[in-house]
Amino acid sequence: MMSPIDRVLDALRSHECKLRPSGDGWEAKCPKHDDKRASLSISEGQDGRALLHCHAGCKFDEVVSALNLETRDLFPPKDPAPQRNGAHPVRSKPAPAPLSQAQVEAMVEALKKDRAAWKHVTEVLRFSTEVVTGLWLGLYIDEQGRRWLAYPDERCGAWTYANCRSLDGEKAFRRLPSGQRTHLYRADTLEADGTAILVEGERDLAAALTMGLHAEVGGASGAAVVSMPGTEQVGMAAAELATQRLVYLVTDNDDAGEMAAAKLATRLGPERCRRVRLDTFKDLGDLLS
């Protein structure tokens, strides 16, 4: 099951509320009101609860409702009352079913057959056909007919979820299915004592592979390219990169990217981190296109 803070962060991302690191937490535009600045503070309490505070005055329950959550979603589950023998009954909510091979293959075929989507991926985003095929990129069409570029991910040899970006001109993201625990995209390509290139977002990962950056570093075997879904996921990224000998930090060329890179270098040890900055582009996706 997702932790309360992960649940809140996922809900904010689904509402297109961009998250930025702030102190020990994050800040974002409040989904309750027409926020012109990042008025909402988000952090994690010592007991695991998610803490929200709108500095513009929105009430706590109003913000929670605007995120399509309930107050109980922001608190860790309570230990159930012990049975007579002292044991706690097991009450676990099953996680949503991960993607199946058939679902992934159907999205792959849909992308190949949709001329407009295929042109966008290969001519606008400029991903190579080898990368599109190797990453199993696909097209997902939701109930409203909106089209999404799907980046499915494997974990321990099985598909977990696909992070999707809108293909209809809006800057929107969604996860298919929702509720799966967040991890680094393509983390299964990491090898112990290897070299990794960390980027922000799936688009930058596909761009790095298309440009062949993985073959430029890491010796004969090259480097693993992985991405984190947002700069708020520094702790998770540091844990998954702990086995790497050398990590190139290619986070976005903005304040949030700089802060995330600095935090990662502190956690991993600066002696094995290299910060890569782009002079005139925000990220690798912009550079490629």
Image (cartoon, helix red, strand yellow):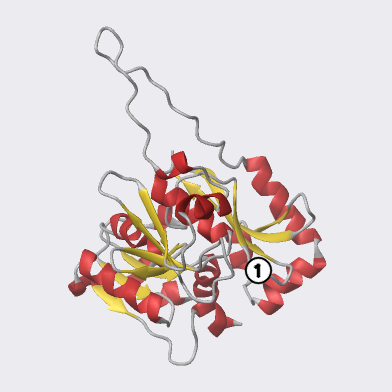
- On the image, the x and y values in percent for residue 197 come to 38, 70
- Against 277, residue 96 (above or below) is above
Along the line of sight, the residue nearer the viewer: 99 or 214: 99
Residue 191 visible within the image: yes
**Secondary structure at numbered mark 1:** helix
Q: Quarter-wise, where is residue 131 in the image?
A: bottom right
Residue drawn 29% across the image and 68% down it: 23
Residue kind at label 1, given as amino acid type: Thr
- On the image, the x and y values in percent for residue 200 come to 45, 69
- On the image, the x and y values in percent for residue 198 come to 39, 68
Along the line of sight, the residue nearer the viewer: 241 or 80: 80
Residue drawn 46% across the image and 64% down it: 57
Whether residue 102 sits left or right of residue 24 in the image: it is right
Whether residue 263 sits left or right of residue 7 in the image: it is left
Residue furthest to the bottom: 280
Q: Quarter-wise, where is residue 260 in the image?
A: bottom left
Q: Quarter-wise, where is residue 170 in the image?
A: bottom right
Residue furthest to the top: 84
- Quarter of the image containing the N terminus? top left
- On the image, the x and y values in percent for residue 95 come to 50, 35
- Quarter of the image containing the C terminus? bottom right
Bin the neighbour count of mark 1 within 10 Å (Cα to Cα): few under 14, some 14-19, many 20 and up: few
Counting the numbered discs, the total is 1
Residue 218 visible within the image: no
From the image, tell me which residue sits under label 1: 129
- Against 280, residue 164 (above or below) is above
- Against 244, residue 76 (above or below) is above
